[in-house]
Amino acid sequence: MSTLRSTLDFLLYDWLHADALVQRPRFAEHSRETFGAVFDTCERIAREKYAPFNRLVDTEEPRFDGERVILPRATHEAHDAYVASGMLGAAQDYAIGGMQLPYTIEAAAGTFFATASVSIGGGLLTTGNANLLMAHGTPLQQEVFARNEFSGRFSGTMCLSEPQAGSSLSDVATRATPDGADFEADPLGPRYRLKGNKMWISAGEHELAENIVHLVLAKIPGADGKLVPGTRGISLFIVPKKLVDTKGQLTGERNDIALAGLNHKLGWRGTTNTLLNFGEGRYPVRGGAGAIGYLVGRPGEGLRCMFHMMNEARIGIGMAATSLGLAGYYASLEYARQRPQGRPVAPAGKDPAQPQVRIIEHADIKRMLLAQKSTCEGALALLLQCARLVDEQHTGEPQAADEARLLLEVLTPVAKSWPSEFCLEANSLAIQVHGGYGYTRDFPVEQYWRDNRLNMIHEGTHGIQAADLLGRKVVMEGGKGLLLLAGRINATIERAIQQPHLAEHANALGQALQKVGSATKAAWATGNPADALANAVPYMQAFGHLVIAWTWLDVLLALPAQPTHAADEGRLRAARYFFHYELPKIPAWLRVVETRDATCASMPEDAF
């Protein structure tokens, strides 16, 4: 069994008790054995169709021949194998061809593909697109678009950013105007014509599927012809690459969506990333100007609908970052066990006559490996815990479901951003363990770093997530979510402090929790958001470290006091590293938060 598989099994079953989900009606036909069969399939596909081609898709980037985007044959074969596995619709009802798999298991299975080749990609956007439509689309939109995405016949994207606006969605300028006087009579939904440009659209053009379903944010002009300012004016539209009938069959008409260019990225080079022009007139359709789109939900509620997909994608990006961190850790661990260099430090000094030792015997190499292990396995535990909360929200008793919702609100920005920053640092350490070989293409760790560098920007930058955490999530509903999280952390502390070997960690976590709580109040002491958010990123770093330390302590409670297996000893040591080397950083980060330090915010532009 692979190291990843054994780690997943421990976290899922010994810690999270995910097998207990089968007692719920929705998952009653499953068992630990069926979960294992899913993992067997995903692990095999990842090993055979993904891992051998990770370097290939990095060097043979997508290219446009003027008519179509060309991807390596390996990408097509990996995509076909993924579709055949049924994972695109794994969590869906049996009635529409799904497996009714817990999201916890679905998320865990995705790590096999992401560690093998995140660049080839899986079904993150397609599944998220379809899940949004299942929540907010009409029954016919679900039948025509979502079900064909779950089957793999169609793929999906999310089209938010624009060249002039970036992450500032309130400045979206894409326009949607009613398509004729009878625009509301179209059975697929109120029909509009869209004109505008969308940037950074992952998987925006390819031929891996019959059709691409774009979910596009746009604004409907008011009676005066002007766009409503701010996010309240944003609506959401289904804009398919190829038009379809009410049975989901292609009509033979191409929508007015043109590929304006491929973005050539630092990493994730195997996945197309595009600039798309909607309604520029290159592909005139049905005698009108603009790309045809169908309204999802009600006008002006597009961002609320899109958050369904965005929040799901944020957890997915956190898992991708974690998986890349783990891939680098496994590679550097293997290298450290094989590479001979140097001699051990002895009381009498080094003896050059003695044979070289493997570098894993050096204390500093152990430090770097422990840093990677504590970061990446801690992040994996957090992401699986978030996935478990999703299942609780959807299938738990009312009070437990509402608590899961609140915890997810608070933890989602952390789950996206903390792994994206610190698992990237783990990838940097993996390069360092390799020494000079680390930044050559003879070893995979430099690619892991490049792939992971995108995740601090994907699905909302680190700064945006930090502002969301401090500016909204910890104060929403009167701080109810933060209080709930603090209660969960305190419950873990109370259990751990009863065990002598964990008491030190429990006390340290308690002090960190108190520090974060007081810093949160101090940040908002003036009631001025500008004062609080000036240091949102240091707050995010401290908050994330608190959450990971809590996660590790909770994981340790699932271990015997005296570990008898090397894997358990490794978890105990990794947690100790985090508490001794990482948790003490919290006070330094929070110092500027507590004092509302204005060093950055008050810096004059011309002083740079």
Image (cartoon, rainbow, N blue to C red):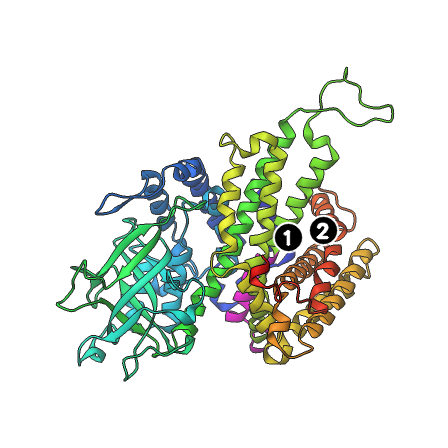
**Mark count:** 2
Q: Percent position (x, y) of residue 504?
A: 82, 56
Of 204 and 534, nearer the camera is 534
Locate the N terminus and report the quarter of the image it occupies.
top right
Which residue does the image show at 64% across and 32% down from the upper left?
336
Q: For residue 383: magenta? A: yes
Quadrant in the picture for residue 583: bottom right
Quickly name the residue at label 2: 578
Q: Main secondary structure of the magenta part?
A: helix
Q: Residue 105 placed where, x, y %? A: 51, 56
Distance (Cα) linking label 1 and label 2: 9 Å
Image x and y of residue 69, in percent: 28, 46
* Residue found farthest to the bottom: 223
Residue 155 placement: quadrant: bottom left
The segment highlighted magenta reads 382-400
Residue 93 seen by the camera: no
> Which residue extends farthest top?
353
Q: Position of residue 569 (x, y in %)?
A: 73, 44
Viewport quadrant of the C terminus: bottom right
Asked which secondary structure carries label 2, the reply is helix
**Residue name at image x 60 percent, y 59 percent:** 607
Cβ atoms under marks 1 and 2 closer than 8 Å: yes
| Mark 2: amino acid | Phe
Q: Residue at x 28, y 83 (%)?
A: 224
Crowd rating for badge 2 (residues with CA inside 10 Å; few <14, some 14–19, many 20+): many
Residue that label 1 marks: 378
